[in-house]
Image (tube, coloured by chain):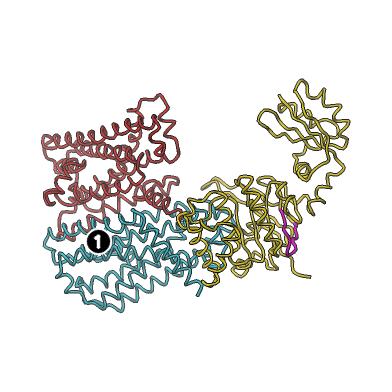
Chain colours: A cyan, B red, C yellow
């Protein structure tokens, strides 16, 4: 019970602080709109205006991913800078609970980003929304969020690990747009990239999301895609648990909890 | 949470993955991953979305746009770091030529930006069959240099602004993304709504990219050179504005009006 | 007999620093071998100069650091194995201003840490009210922490450390950076806590602080405990010595070196003042030292010379004095 309280309170506080901060708005609103806009201009240029969903939803996914990735990367680092990481490590609540709360708050902002893009899309292209198969769309969306959540839980301890890991994770922003099939189907990528995309859990749930929005070349196989997405998510969660454990042991051994 | 302000700036410092040069791997990651994936992503998106458009169109545009990473973020950070580490007063107190110091800030990023473009062009050749057989290579090189210089110009203006406002990094991000939309990177400027076309003309990059496209196509230099001239002029105008602002701020700082900033 | 609050046996900690890829690593021995017992209910002070290993001891005891060798038992639990249960029973406060959420109010900080220490909300509310009164932050508790003075932040830290009513409270240099009045107030608070039954383990490099409030002290130097006992007992370890103290003008390193080499001199301390240096020399026979001072000072001016009994601070200085080369 007390762990839930920590998660909830962390979530609330973080949300409050992030909303009060201009950078949030940039990532949440501007970046997705820029990507959505580029998508719209491109998709409406060729003979593919039927695929506008990739621009409208895709821009939102780009925003969701960026907000999640960058916030998760700095969740632990920010505590370190504030000198509060030691307090968190030394208290009876697991550090992961605090991070879960923080990630939940960035996911909320990410969702706002997705929602903003969809709202704009709704105004200008209502027909896109008539094609949506609501239930699989909702389930796929929820599973995508879950996958992002699990990835964030991997990224947070990884970033805290070394600065190099941080830099590498930084370079993950655009690759995820590609591998996740955020703005076009993964199927168009080269053959050797496909297995990589398969390891990226959101690629399955995003595929299902687009299928539910009427963007699928083949008959949608929701159970398979959801299953694979969930399996990937489970692997990330296990990996994250291991990383948090390693982080704590290493910090306790090296005595460098408090320092960047 | 306290660190939130710090976090956001740290975040932006890392944003676009430019500034983690502390480790070779970090540098390689910023130097390779970011430009390469930007080119790959937009080429794939462009080709699919336009139903089989020319991949080299998107490849050239994005390869050129990569200079903005250095020109904008690099230069803004260089000035910003100076403020963060408190070395700016020393700089101001030194007898060094202001103009030289000021331009010196950006010299490294011009070179580093050019390296990024070369990498991005190599990727375009390897993956998307960009052919430079008919290209006017000296002209292409000149376009790359011109864009690297002109983006640094706007970087210098933003850098000067960053001495007064920390939130200038937001503006830097905005400009970076604006380039993606308005500079003819992924589609011709003429396809933009009228207002955005005006914005495009007021910013560097679009003419340089147009010149690069002409150079790759092997068009006569007489068509590209005026574009490059304009590109450099725009860049110089921003750099001059940045320098003026820098001098004005320096004057204020001397009179004690900018304690906060320095 | 009740279980010791802190029990350290041959505790050793070695830090390894990597220089970067392929450039090898270096080791720093923070604790050589530390043995220490703190019974429950005591206000215990661990003294030592900066870098002596005080903070390392506290971090090991608070489960933030693993020992390289030896054992540390806190409230009967081995810290290497102990986890959350032990953390629930101890509190810790590190000196300095960091470690709080500056953009939140003091109250929100306490409420958040109350959650982290698993306090039920209604109990947390009552406890926060009590503690805010105790540390004297009424009226300012709803201000953002960034607007607090150093002393207020330190008092908020103390309240945070006490939220869950720990059986044992660790305070690492709690008065560091505080002005004299703030430091005195904080010491009174800590003494009060101990009087009400909380075991307090405090580190400090300020001898007077330890003398003022601690029941018992230990001096750690270069990773070892070199003296332990009640402040009186530790002080008496230098009882066979006397202290010659004077203000000097124009003193330099060469002169200090010469003072150190005078027969019988155990320790020399020089503290720079505004115009003069205050020189303290400890030796078994102060009277004969005074006679030798004149030629030794070689033109430097000495005023206000007096001979006195050693204080705890003198004992401490002698204990941690660099051995003559």
Q: Secondary structure at mark 1?
A: helix
Residue C296 or B178: which is nearer the viewer? C296
C42 falls in the magenta region: yes
Main secondary structure along the magenta-highlighted residues: strand
As drawn, is B177 to the left or to the right of C10?
Answer: left
C286 within the magenta span: no
Q: Position of residue C321 (x, y in %)?
A: 75, 40
Residue B251 versus residue A98 in the image, above or below:
above
Tally the marks: 1
Q: Which residues are magenta?
A: C35-45
Chain letter, disc 1 residue: A
Q: Is residue C209 visible in this depiction of the protein?
A: yes
What's the residue at 24%, 46% (across, down)? B65
Q: Which residue: 41% across, 34% down?
A: B88
Question: Compared to B141, does C111 lie above or below?
Answer: below
Q: Position of residue A108 (x, y in %)?
A: 35, 65
Of residues C18 and A250, the one drawn nearer to the viewer in this rendering:
A250
Looking at the picture, how far across and down is residue B196, in whole percent?
A: 16, 49
Q: Which residue is mark 1?
A: A59
């Amino acid at each position: 019970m007390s762990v839930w309280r920590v998660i909830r309170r962390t979530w609330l506080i973080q949300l409050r602080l992030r909303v009060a901060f201009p950078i949030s708005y940039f990532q949440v609103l501007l970046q997705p709109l820029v990507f959505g806009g580029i998508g719209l201009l491109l998709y409406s240029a060729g003979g593919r205006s039927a695929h506008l969903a990739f621009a409208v939803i895709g821009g939102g996914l780009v925003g969701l991913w960026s907000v999640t990735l960058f916030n998760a990367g700095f969740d632990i680092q920010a505590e370190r800078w504030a000198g509060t990481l030691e307090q968190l490590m030394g208290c009876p609540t697991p550090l992961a609970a605090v991070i879960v709360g923080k990630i939940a708050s960035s996911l909320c902002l990410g969702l706002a980003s997705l929602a903003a893009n969809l709202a704009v899309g709704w105004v200008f292209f209502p027909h896109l929304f008539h094609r949506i198969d609501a239930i699989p769309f909702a389930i796929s969306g929820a599973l995508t969020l879950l996958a992002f959540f699990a990835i964030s839980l991997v990224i947070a301890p990884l970033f805290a690990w070394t600065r190099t890991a941080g830099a590498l994770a930084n370079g993950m922003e655009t690759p995820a747009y590609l591998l996740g099939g955020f703005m076009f189907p993964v199927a168009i990528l080269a053959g050797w990239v496909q297995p990589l995309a398969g390891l990226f859990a959101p690629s399955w749930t995003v595929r299902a999301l687009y299928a539910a929005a009427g963007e699928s070349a083949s008959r949608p196989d929701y159970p398979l895609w959801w299953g694979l997405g969930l399996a990937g998510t489970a692997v990330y969660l296990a990996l994250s648990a291991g990383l948090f454990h390693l982080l704590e042991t290493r910090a306790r051994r090296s005595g460098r909890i408090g320092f960047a | 949470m306290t660190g939130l302000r710090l976090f956001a700036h740290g975040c932006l410092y890392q944003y676009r993955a430019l500034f983690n040069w502390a480790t070779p791997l970090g540098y390689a990651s910023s130097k390779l991953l970011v430009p390469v994936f930007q080119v790959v992503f937009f080429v794939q998106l462009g080709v699919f979305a336009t139903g089989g458009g020319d991949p080299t169109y998107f490849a050239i545009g994005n390869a050129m746009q990569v200079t903005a990473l250095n020109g904008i973020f690099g230069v803004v950070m260089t000035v910003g770091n100076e403020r963060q580490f408190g070395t700016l007063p020393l700089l101001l107190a030194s007898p060094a030529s202001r103009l030289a110091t000021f331009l010196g800030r950006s010299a490294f990023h011009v070179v580093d930006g050019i390296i990024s473009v070369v990498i991005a062009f190599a990727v375009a050749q390897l993956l998307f069959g960009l052919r430079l057989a008919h290209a006017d290579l000296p002209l292409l090189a000149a376009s790359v240099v011109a864009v690297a210089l002109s983006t640094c110009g706007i970087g210098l203006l933003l850098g000067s602004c960053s001495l007064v406002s920390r939130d200038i990094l937001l503006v830097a991000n905005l400009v970076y993304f604006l380039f993606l939309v308005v500079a003819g990177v992924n589609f011709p400027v003429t396809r933009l709504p009228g207002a955005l076309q005006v914005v495009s003309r007021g910013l560097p990059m679009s003419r340089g990219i147009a010149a690069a496209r002409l150079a790759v196509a092997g068009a006569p230099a007489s068509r590209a050179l005026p574009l490059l001239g304009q590109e450099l002029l725009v860049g110089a105008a921003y750099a001059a504005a940045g320098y003026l602002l820098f001098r004005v701020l320096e004057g204020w700082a001397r009179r004690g009006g900018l304690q906060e900033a320095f | 007999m009740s279980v010791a609050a802190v029990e350290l046996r041959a505790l050793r900690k070695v830090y390894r620093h990597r220089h970067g890829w392929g450039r090898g690593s270096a080791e720093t021995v923070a604790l050589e071998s530390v043995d220490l017992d703190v019974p429950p209910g005591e206000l215990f002070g661990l003294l030592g100069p900066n870098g002596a290993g005080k903070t390392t001891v506290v971090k090991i005891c608070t489960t933030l650091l693993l020992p390289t060798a030896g054992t540390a038992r806190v409230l009967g639990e081995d810290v290497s194995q102990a986890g959350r249960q032990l953390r629930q029973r101890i509190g810790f406060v590190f000196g300095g201003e960091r470690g709080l959420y500056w953009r939140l109010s003091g109250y929100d900080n306490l409420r958040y840490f109350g959650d982290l220490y698993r306090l039920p909300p209604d109990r947390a509310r009552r406890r926060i009210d009590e503690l805010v009164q105790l540390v004297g932050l009424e009226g300012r508790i709803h201000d953002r922490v960034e607007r607090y003075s150093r002393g207020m932040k330190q008092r908020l830290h103390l309240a945070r450390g006490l939220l869950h009513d720990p059986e044992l409270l660790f305070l690492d240099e709690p008065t560091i950076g505080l002005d004299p009045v703030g430091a005195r107030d904080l010491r009174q608070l800590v003494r009060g806590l101990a009087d009400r039954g909380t075991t307090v383990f405090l580190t400090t490099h300020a001898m007077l602080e330890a003398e003022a409030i601690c029941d018992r002290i230990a001096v750690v130097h270069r990773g070892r405990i070199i003296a332990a006992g009640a402040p009186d007992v530790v002080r008496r370890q230098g009882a066979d010595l006397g202290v010659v103290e004077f203000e000097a003008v124009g003193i330099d390193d060469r002169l200090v070196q010469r003072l150190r080499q005078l027969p019988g001199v155990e320790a020399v301390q020089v503290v720079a003042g505004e115009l003069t240096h205050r020189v303290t020399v400890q030796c078994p026979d102060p009277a004969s030292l005074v006679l030798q001072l004149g030629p030794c000072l070689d033109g430097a001016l000495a005023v206000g010379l007096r001979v006195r009994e050693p204080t705890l601070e003198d004992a401490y200085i002698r204990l941690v004095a660099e051995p003559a080369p």
